[in-house]
Amino acid sequence: MTAQARGQGALHAGKSKLNRMTFTDVWIMAFLVFFSLLVFYPFYNSVLISITPQAVYIREPFMLWPKALDKSSYQYVFENKAIWSGMITTIQITLIGTAYNVFLTVTMAYALNHSFPGKKFVIAFIMFTMYFSGGLIPTYMMIKDVGLMNTLWAMILPSGVSISYLMVMRKFFQSIPEEVEESAKIDGANDLIIMFRVVLPLALPMVITFVIYYGVERWNEWYNGLLYIKSASKMPLQLVLRQIVQNSQSIQASESMQEAGITPFGDGIKMAAVIVTMFPVMVLYPFLQKYFVSGLTVGAVKG
């Protein structure tokens, strides 16, 4: 078949699909496009506000494209030392905390997938903590008594395992055929070797998925920082952003902006800080999205 013939065949197939579309299909597609625009516009509007001069924004608060460009909001954000210290703190929390969460989740899920004395009681106790906690005051007193106040560990250690993620991971381990582990045991492998060299490669898509989930949660960490952190240099990025949003109307120009005669635009700085905070996650997510797949265990056991 020539290239021209293949092209004509694809064209006819496309036309036949269009001919089979009903009014309902067109209405659903139009609704989805409209809904997508509704979801996308707030983010797009935040970008416009962050790059628009204050005078233009006052005249036209609802914009479809910028009438003028102004980089002073981003200039203020990048010259703000609190943003950079918060960025460093949040990166540390994200890297250490995500590794800590995933390690505990995987090892606990693997252990709960096997039989041992008191297994039902342990599972019931874990599920109990999913619905009931010790409370805010006892948790605060415990963090204070163990000496974690005003340290990064106060934002990392209390949130060890998400019970819902743990149960999903346990169910995934249950879907792996028992013959996989049995064959490894016949070859002389112990439980640690089986978990790290046999089971985890099969569960890699699920592990990467939870790395993303835990990573986003750690990146958005601010509540524990609000409770346990007193030093401004140790505050996470989201807490710094919260302070910028709260104080957006009383922002003072930096020295370089004062020398240039630039008046800070509160809403623009607020939106610029939001964009800068979201940017690292937005850059990494497309590269990790391909791991949202499952079913690598299909065909793992032949016969």
Image (cartoon, rainbow, N blue to C red):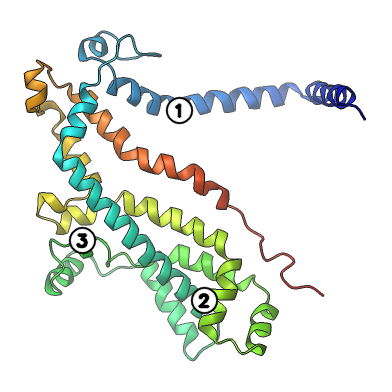
Ranked by sequence position, the earlier of labels 2 and 1 is 1
Q: In which quadrant of the rendered image does the C terminus lie?
A: bottom right
Residue drawn at (28%, 57%) of the image:
93
Camera-side residue of 69 and 144: 69
Ranked by sequence position, the earlier of labels 2 and 3 is 2
From the viewer's perspective, is 43 left or right of 198? Answer: left
As helix, strand or loop, the secondary structure at mark 1 comes to helix
Residue position for label 1: 40
What's the CA distance linking mark 3 and mark 1? 35 Å
Label drawn at residue 110: 2
Task: Name the residue furthest front.
Answer: 2
Marks 3 and 1: CB-CB under 8 Å?
no
Residue drawn at (11%, 22%) of the image:
257
**Residue 202 drawn at (x, y percent):** 61, 67
What's the CA distance linking mark 2 and mark 3? 29 Å
Query: Would you place residue 42 above or below residue 260 in this image?
Result: below
Neighbourhood count class around disc 2 (C-alpha, 10 Å): few under 14, some 14–19, many 20 upward: many
